[in-house]
Image (cartoon, rainbow, N blue to C red):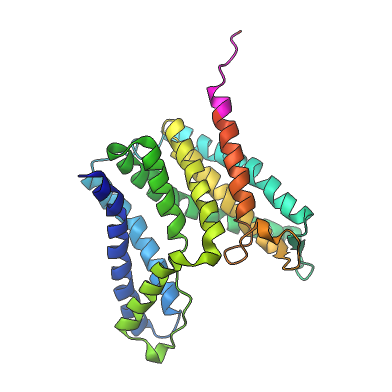
Amino acid sequence: MGRLTTVLAPFALLMLLSALASLMGFGLLRLAGDVLPLHKVISKLTLILLLLSIFPLRNILRLSWAELGFAPAPKFFKQMGQGLLFAVLTLAPVLLLLYALDVHVWDPSRVWTPGKVLEKTALSLFLALLIGVGEEMLFRGLLLSVLRRRLPLVAAIGCSSLYYAVLHFLKSQSQIPYQQQTLASAYQLLAEAFVNWLNPQYFTAMIALLVVGVFLAVLRTRVPQSLGLCIGCHAGWVWQIKFSKDLCNLNPQSDYLYLVNTAYDGVVGPLVSVWLAMALLLWLKLKQTPRLEG
């Protein structure tokens, strides 16, 4: 398999699964009725199919769980805990700075009790862990492992990180009334989702997610069997973002609004790109520093 084929094969798989998700999504809504927007059903089904593809592809490509990055259970769960802590150390300063600069402002309309805080914390952490496990198995597990077999390390990291970044923007926002939905409209939404990659309003968010992908891929390749570390880190970031958005609102009048991408989630953007790039360089520098004996 040539290098170009290796790079394009994940895109071909994504096209195939998203086309299948469009067909399935249209069929499900014909059976279930007008319960969800068609574009959301297609988006969720595409992600589900991608995650399910991990298991047959792992067998076809003869990849062991260890090659995907899984350590033995005790070490894996320890890594997840370390990753959660690392996530707090790397993202909490960004969120605090955004609050200090009035990019994020406290939402006074919400009433918080200890029980409500505990419930929200547990639920958001659970959802974040589901996202972390699924996306890390797919991108830093399967995809990065396959690319490393056939590409130079830097190219494998860059390619897997690019796929990770753009997948977050495979979405269409068009609302097609249920009575007007046809199979053709399902594929129209799919085409809009792929064109969305070229939407300039998401550019800074896409760059930031590319940096996030590189950060996690470097962790995965520099630390043996470290998928648990990547999962913990990923889940910790998602959890903090979800919780922050529950506590605060985006202030459109802030002088520092350019630090975030308002079209994406109001957190990811130029500040995250610069901060994580600096954190990665610092970590690599510390990894190269020889330890003192004695």
Vertical order, 30 against 137 (above or below): below
Give the residue displayed 29% in from the left and 53% down from the top.
8
Q: Would residue 28 be seen by someone viewing this image from the given angle?
A: no
Quadrant housing residue 25: bottom left
Q: Is residue 214 left or right of residue 253?
A: left
Q: Residue furthest bottom?
A: 179
| Horizontal and vertical percent position of residue 49 | 33, 61
| Horizontal and vertical percent position of residue 288 | 53, 23
Give the residue displayed 73% in from the left and 50% down from the top.
96
Q: Which image quadrant: the N terminus?
A: top left
Q: Is residue 290 covered in magenta?
A: yes
Give the residue displayed 27% in from the left and 64% down from the top.
16
Q: Would residue 186 be seen by someone viewing this image from the given angle?
A: yes
Q: Is residue 183 covered in magenta?
A: no
| Horizontal and vertical percent position of residue 94 | 68, 49
Vertical order, 90 against 126 (above or below): above
Q: Nearer the viewer, residue 278 or 283?
A: 278
**What span is colored magenta in the figure?**
285-293
Q: Which image quadrant: the C terminus?
A: top right
Give the residue displayed 44% in from the left and 37% down from the top.
220
| Horizontal and vertical percent position of residue 51 | 36, 56
Q: Is residue 209 left or right of residue 96?
A: left
Quadrant housing residue 278: top right
Quadrant housing residue 281: top right
Vertical order, 176 against 87 (above or below): below
